[in-house]
Image: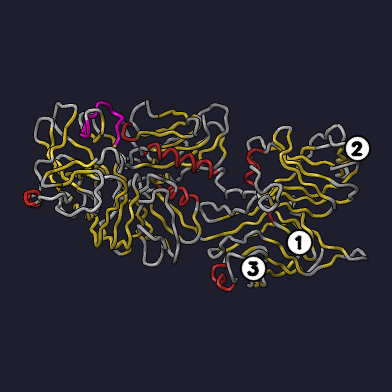
Amino acid sequence: MNMKKITKLLCVAALLLAGLGGVIPAKATKLYATYGTPASEGKWDVETNTYTWTQGYSNLMTIFTFPNGELAQYKSLHLTTSDFTSSYRVCFMNGSTAVATIVFWSAGQKDLVFSERDETKNLDLTTITHISFGGASGSGSIGLTNVYLEKPFELVIDESGKAKVDITDLKASGCFSLNDQTGVLTSTMDEEGAPVWGNLAINFPTEGVDLSSLTGFSMNITGEALFNNFSIGSKGFWSSVTGRGDLAQYMDQVGDKTKVTVWQWNANKGGTMTINSLELQFSAITASNPHYTPLTAANFNGAYCEYHVGEAMSQGSTIYGNGSVVADNYADLSAYDELHITGTPGQVVRLLFNWGSSKDEIIQTLDADGFTSIDLKALPGQQLNAFKFTYDGKTAIITSMNLYKAEVATAYSYNLTGSGKLAPSAEKALADESATGYDASGVTGTGLELTPANPNALFTAGAGVLSNAQNVIVNGTCANLVLTDGYPFKAPVAFTATTASYTTTINAEAGAGTLCLPFAAAIPEGVTAYTLAYTSGDKATATAVENTIPANTPVLLNGSGEATFTGAAAAVAATANNAAGTLTGVFEKTKVAQGSYVLQNLDGGIGFYKVASDDIYVNPFRAYLTAQASASRIAISYDNVATGIQTVAAQQTDDTVYDLQGRRVSAPTKGLYIVGGKKVMMK
């Protein structure tokens, strides 16, 4: 994937996350029922929330619909029923067919955990189109007061570490009741109609969520606060009950920070209060791409700079810079290659520059993904005076403006900084399969495990910060370098690997392959490695490598099946010239130029065949052959073997099998061997 495409994907992802520039909305874990049209033998009373049915079985009413199999996102169904007169049922429907039915014989709170019920634990929830409710037999009626589906709780933080908790995820107990759809908190009343006040426990759904990096919280309320202190886990506080920013220093007193289920407030009066929002603040790890710099007001040379990223703006508005387009007021973008803009798809934008002529603007339209790119180097000048919307009658939002630079001083794909939970930028950085290196020297804390989408990605971090079992560089040493076939690799810095390994599979039918590794690797038993040299004609000469393949040296392999190459105290270079003879090795998927040769097993036999198209690629840790030749195929000649092998061949008179390094082989696989003093290709 090329850099510009990666840029667009990252920018569009940022657009979707940014919204209006605020905190990412909480992901509500509850979906409340909506009551549809009953069947012919049923009736729904919207005033009393009562369902009545007559004799018969055609009385189902749809309460949830799933047009795209969304039920699979949920873990349970909850029903609160009252005024029970007859048995009732919940049906899981695929079209008009009930594929699972649960019958109840009593009223009250019913909690159906799909994975635990016999009726649903083996049910493919993605096939369910709707859930229906109705009578099970005879006639009857029942009141429905609280019916909802529930997802597993997920805490989603934004780039600054803030996370909103949806009010529907809160539950009150004790002396108050909470309407989790409106946030209204109401005192329990005694027999004389007076409010009862005492403890209020809000069941906060954070069990399993690590709160160790929690630094603060903020609760927005309407009405008078009804409580005067609160506790998180085993830690109590006696002030600022609707917000604190100093929780980090107390978190070691909370107890098990992954099993906090209740935040408890002590009420000092009765009454009614509305919880409008609850927001948590965590310390966060963020990521930045060294190729990108946000365009901000700090880049602008002038007394005043408009800056309205993340705001809904009307036609003709100035989003950035000086709307009067004063020549002396500008942002100098000459140090960068491109300007990338994300925002409302289809929005037309104007960029005005100091060009010293009447043609001083660029007009472009954001594409269907809300992205556009300005090639700054192609412009007559790079002094940006203003960035505006055109007069097209629309209101739109610009979510990001980033300056892109192709050549940067670092070889890392991303820089990680901070501590605690992963911010969206860090999650996206780790999900980037093309990323080969993360500079995590700015990350603090201990025992953090980071899992990249590319298993070959390297991390540089301080001692003890990361608990990853492999590919972490600390003070110039990687304790365990493990390379996975098929994924890209690039060392951002030079280092020493205490142990190193790479496993590949040599094509069994061909009995041959190519290899290039960044560390010096021992040749495993049953495998022979050769350097390759081409001089002229249609043949290349293979020369056997004894015992160890040098680092960054592309070789031809003979063998078959899985083979693991290992190294110890191996030096890995930050930059490497992966060429030996006429073979060129690669550590990333690489397009091969026409006229080069790649190893193939075709009708002409095993050999290097000329590339005749521009869409041939070589995978990581492989090699291709460059030769100024007219032949369509270059055959491999094994005539120039090592002196030690010639000696073995000359002395051998029995049928003992040796590899081309002169080592005895007890169970030869496919490949070239010495048998009875002669070279033999085993198939």
Which numbered disc flags the more N-terminal residue, 2 or 1?
2
Quarter occupied by residue 606: top left
Quarter occupied by residue 498: bottom left
Q: Secondary structure at mark 2?
A: loop
Above or below: residue 617 compared with residue 499: above
Count of all numbered marks drawn on residues in the image: 3
Task: Look at the image and say whether residue 606 sits in the magenta stretch.
Answer: yes
* Amino acid found under the numbered disc labelled 2: Gln
Is residue 580 visible in the rendered image? The answer is yes
* CB-based contact (under 8 Å), mark 3 and mark 2: no
Residue 403 on image: x %, y %: 38, 42
Q: Secondary structure at mark 1?
A: loop
Quarter the C terminus occupies = top left
Range covered by the magenta-colored residues:
605-617
Q: Counting other residues with Cα less than 10 Å from the Cα at mark 2, is it few (<14), some (14-19), or many (20 or more)?
A: some
Apparent side of residue 227 relative to residue 639 in the rendered image (left or right): right
Residue 402 on image: x %, y %: 42, 42
Q: Which residue carries the number 3 mark? A: 232
Apparent side of residue 261 relative to residue 40 in the rendered image (left or right): left
Q: Which residue carries the number 2 mark? A: 55
**Mark nearer the viewer, 3 or 2:** 2
Apparent side of residue 73 relative to residue 2 in the rendered image (left or right): right
Instruction: Give the CA separation, mark 1 to mark 3.
Output: 22 Å
Task: Look at the image and say whether residue 87 sits in the magenta stretch.
Answer: no
Q: Residue furthest right?
A: 192
Q: Which residue carries the number 1 mark? A: 224
* CB-based contact (under 8 Å), mark 2 and mark 1: no
